[in-house]
Image (cartoon, rainbow, N blue to C red):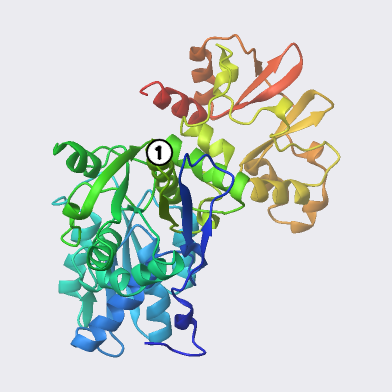
Amino acid sequence: MRRDGHVLNTIGNTPLVELKNLDTGPCRLFVKLENQNPTGSIKDRIGLSMVEAAERLGHIKPGGTLIEATAGNTGLGLALVAAQKGYKIILVIPDKMAQEKILHLRALGADCRITRSDVGKGHPEYYQDIAERLSTEIPNSFYVNQFANPANPFAHEATTGPEIWAQTEHMLDAVVVGVGSGGTLSGLGRYFARVAPQVQMVVADPIGSILEPLIERGENITPGSWLVEGIGEDFIPPNCDLSLAKKAYAISDAESFFTAREVLAKEGILGGSSTGTLVAAALRYCREQTAPKRVVTFICDSGNKYLTKMYNDFWMFEQGLLDRPKQGNLIDLIVRRYQEGSVATLAPNETLLQAYRRMKLFDVSQLPVMEGERIVGILDESDVLLSVQGDPARFSQSVASAMCATVVTIAPNAPIQELLPIFAKDLVAVVSDHGRFVGLITKIDLLNYLRKQLG
């Protein structure tokens, strides 16, 4: 149903564009820009479909509360619809979700309950079990349950499929999808089985998910973990009809993220983490073909939600996904290196107000104070606080008046064990090479380094 002049009317009817600058083998690869939906993802379609179905069936009454377990994007779609229709909404979200999504949800008025992402179904802190439990405790509430709600796949069967079929002018050979709730695979699979049974449904799955082994080899595996958000599963949702999938590809986090970054660099399209998984799988499919085919996949959501994660080199490095040449010394632990221009610094004559603003901008609690290539002090948030408490006018004082000028440095070739006494004094390690500042090592830097040794 159309709603002329309403934001909900802008859901769907997204553009289909061809990727021209990637190696697609003998095939033509098109992407449907679901990032152009109101909250920036394909999940707006199912959010609207599931709420309107609940209204028709009398499952939700005016002033009621929607409850859902979500990786973020379905929650955004539901929060948009709830805000427009006057419902309250509670969302249970695993703790690996991008902070941008959570901030967006809260800005839409959602009550976000963050829970663990490292537990499976049946555990009391598993996000779906929490959502279902809340729906039994809160009066006039409705557990949306995208994983079993038939209005989820119906949204794709009724809108996404017909749009793709029309946009490709009825010339289509394969559609590559991800599986989170299973709605996209099942809805599109049913639609194309009816109107164009020659179209193959292909699944893009993160390594660690149970789906690709099941589809390709009939193998049941113990689920692992992955960083890509919104797709991959540790169980088969009721909405997921795996029999519709003709092929599946397992894609690593690294390949997903670097593919998404390549799509931005070469095609100018800013997609999210699952976009990288889908495009990577679609490229593999295309390159395996021996005859020309027309293939469609999705820009599932906007990369604006991941700017601090997969599009951030420092985050990628901390996750062990971005390699640098190994030095074989403490430099390998330094995320932000001074010689690369990635360290926020201060000069002694700058003010404490400038220091405060820089700490906020770069989300750090201490800054090196530099004269040329030489570090002459460290200013941390405690130094600033002790200087200005009681008289905010002291923000105009110089950094030199508050910094710790006694800087104990450590050489790059020092053993890692020498960091521990520094951290025991609640200090950061200042690495200096023959008087030249190299960078800072914090406790979390050491923890990240040790974690990466696990592989």
Q: Secondary structure at mark 1?
A: helix
Residue depicted at 25% across the width and 82% down the height: 53
Whether residue 447 is situated above or below residue 166 in the rendered picture: above
Q: Of the residues shown, which amino acid type is indicated by label 1?
A: Arg
Residue depicted at 37% across the width and 80% down the height: 82
Q: Whole-percent x and y of residue 106?
A: 45, 68
Residue depicted at 79% across the width and 40% down the height: 399
Whether residue 300 is situated above or below residue 450 in the rendered picture: below
Q: Is residue 187 left or right of residue 283?
A: left
Q: Residue furthest front?
A: 291
Number of marks in picture: 1
Q: Whole-percent x and y of residue 359?
A: 67, 46
Residue 348 seen in the figure: yes
Residue 76 seen in the figure: no
Rendered-image quadrant of the C terminus? top left
Residue depicted at 36% across the width and 23% down the height: 454
Q: Is residue 183 left or right of residue 398?
A: left
Q: Whole-percent x and y of residue 347?
A: 82, 36
Q: Is residue 55 left or right of residue 307?
A: left
438 or 35, which is in the foreground? 35
Whether residue 94 is situated above or below residue 205 in the rendered picture: below
410 or 183, which is in the foreground? 183
Rendered-image quadrant of the N terminus? bottom left
In the figure, residue 368 lies in which quadrant? top right
Q: Is residue 86 left or right of residue 195?
A: right
Q: Residues within 10 Å of mark 1 (few under 14, many from 20)?
A: some
34 or 308, which is in the foreground? 34
Q: Which residue is mark 1?
A: 284
In the figure, residue 335 lies in which quadrant? top right
